[in-house]
Amino acid sequence: MKKAIIVIIAFLFIFFLGILLLYHNLPTAAGIEDIDIDESSILTLDISKTYPEKVDMDFSFFQQMGKRGVAFHRLIKTIEYAKDDENIKALYLTGTGNALNRAQSEELAIALKEFRDKKPIYGYTEILTMGSSVLFAQADHFYVPPPGMLLINGVSIEPLFYKGLFDKLGVGMDVVMRGDFKGGMENFTRKSFSEPFAETIDMLLDDIMLFYKNRVTDARGITDEDFDKLIEKGLIWGDEMYETGLVDGLLYPNQVDSVLMAKLSEEGDDIDIEDFEDRLLSINKYANFVEAETELLKDGKIALVIAEGSIRSGKGNPSPFGGDDGIYGDKLSATIDEVARDDEIDAIVLRVNSPGGSALASDIIWNSIVRAKAKKPFIVSQAGVAASGGYYISMPADTIFAGEGTVTGSIGVYGGKPYVEGLMDEWGVTKDTFKRGEYSQIYSTITRPWTDAEKALLLRSIDHTYETFVGKAAEGRNRSFAQIDSVAQGHIWTGTRAVENGLVDRIGGLWDAIACAQRMAGNPANEQPEIVTYPKPKTFMDLIETLENVQLPGPLGRAVRMLSDENTAASIDFGQPMLYCPFDVKTDKPTGY
């Protein structure tokens, strides 16, 4: 395993060294000031590509070629700038599927609508999905090819339950929890969800369906009844889409090009196909241009701290590819402390996109936020999901913003561990135990279920964690313990309902939160602040310095780390209190948050 990792490291080193040499041999310096925008251009945006909350790698020399990734907050501001840029005549929306989460889609849809109020938006896709419909609905000239398909077929949650399998294998599951609606371990202890948890899921799906329905019907001018009929059909083709009013025409890609060329010709330009292709301006390239154009116009400095992924204890193992595959309590706490100490930072915005995780790590982050808000305004912007531990690190903020479709709340606690006593009996495996202390095996053994004494101790731990959670939520939200407890119990809420029950302050996107931070810092509300993103993007030299601790990103990296860890099983903290939201809501992609 170590030899394989060394080979991978060597390959990556040579690859990136080649890129660096290529950069140094470019005929001109690759700076963003060299970007030229034609006087009559069409801005293109592919929504099937990701626009992450933060861009992990900062290869600034790619900017001239438009290759640098665009962070989501820059995407929104770029579209806002484009609507007033005389060189931009229209926006062209493309892509199959939607790579953005619901909160991002909501904010982007608003930005597109504001652009459409001044300039036309053209859209083209081969397959219109539930997720992408929210964005393509904003186009006032929307086309699909004649054989194009509509897959607006609803949203779903379909978790797997393992109790039946465990029963056959002789595996059991010990669980302690607090919260009638906290269903985080029901996949392992039941064959279907409990009635309280099923109730909260049904309400969540109703709210999410309403989210999609309202945006599509309002933008396209179709009735609720027509939308419901589309859901019932599940799949329709181009001609019926046109008859329903979802699209404005049935055109092939070359015909859409002709429409766009005609739009540019209206501006007095006589262009051929080569000129036309030059006038299609990618959002990546234009974002770099906008960044350069507005650099000297900014007033104030706002820190944008990104908290994305599951919450874990410790500092994590830095990856040269950027990101640590989650939120680490000690690391995020240190980042917040650093920003709070920086006198040049006027206010802090924490962007949360997390289903939760470790209760201890969440509390460590909570403590750093409390200390930071004593020094400067602290605002939270909840993205697709900010539930359980994700809500825990949101609740001390001065103001919490969430999208209408944000999944939040889930104030509850659980802990659990499997035991293989039946499996051992089936296969004749025996054990001999030596211990000192009644509770010495409470977190380590999987050979037997907890004793009554062990379970009682863990229940006290879970109760203490829950009461701490509710108490601190009440303190942060200026409400009583009873008021928060009544909307807690593990209940999951959408952003709209969270505002109604006091868990969230306002419905709004990331730039609404930034504007709030700007006002609270006493800076001009109508001026754009400089945004400093944390964790800071890694540079090429950072990659070189951290190659000795290389970690592959994503599922492959997790698999390699697991296989190379001799103590994988021993490193699992069974029974520890967890603050976690247990499922995804699916639309047109596997993870619907």
Image (spheres, helix red, strand yellow):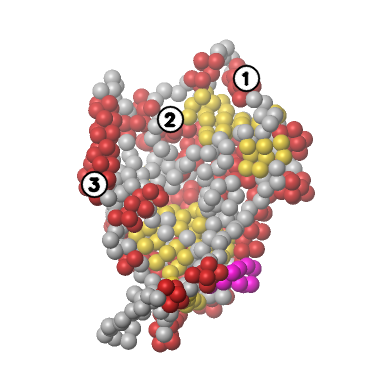
Q: Is residue 255 visible?
A: yes
Label 2 vs label 3, nearer the camera: 3
Label 2 vs label 1, nearer the camera: 1
Q: Is tag 2's residue or tag 3's residue first in the polypeptide sequence?
A: 3
Q: Which residues are magenta?
A: 189-199
The percent coordinates of residue 551 (x first, y second) are 30, 49
Q: Residues within 10 Å of mark 1 (few under 14, many from 20)?
A: few
Residue at 24% over, 28% down: 21
- Residue linked to disc 1: 258
Q: CA distance from mark 3 to mark 1?
A: 55 Å
Foreground of the two, 223 or 300: 223
Q: Is tag 2's residue or tag 1's residue first in the polypeptide sequence?
A: 1
- Residue linked to disc 2: 285
Foreground of the two, 92 or 253: 253
Foreground of the two, 224 or 515: 224
Q: Is residue 468 visible?
A: no
The percent coordinates of residue 478 (x first, y second) are 49, 71
Q: Is tag 3's residue or tag 1's residue first in the polypeptide sequence?
A: 3
The percent coordinates of residue 57 (x first, y second) are 34, 41
- Residue linked to disc 3: 3
Residue 89 magenta: no
Q: Which mark is residue 390?
A: none
Element class at badge 2: helix
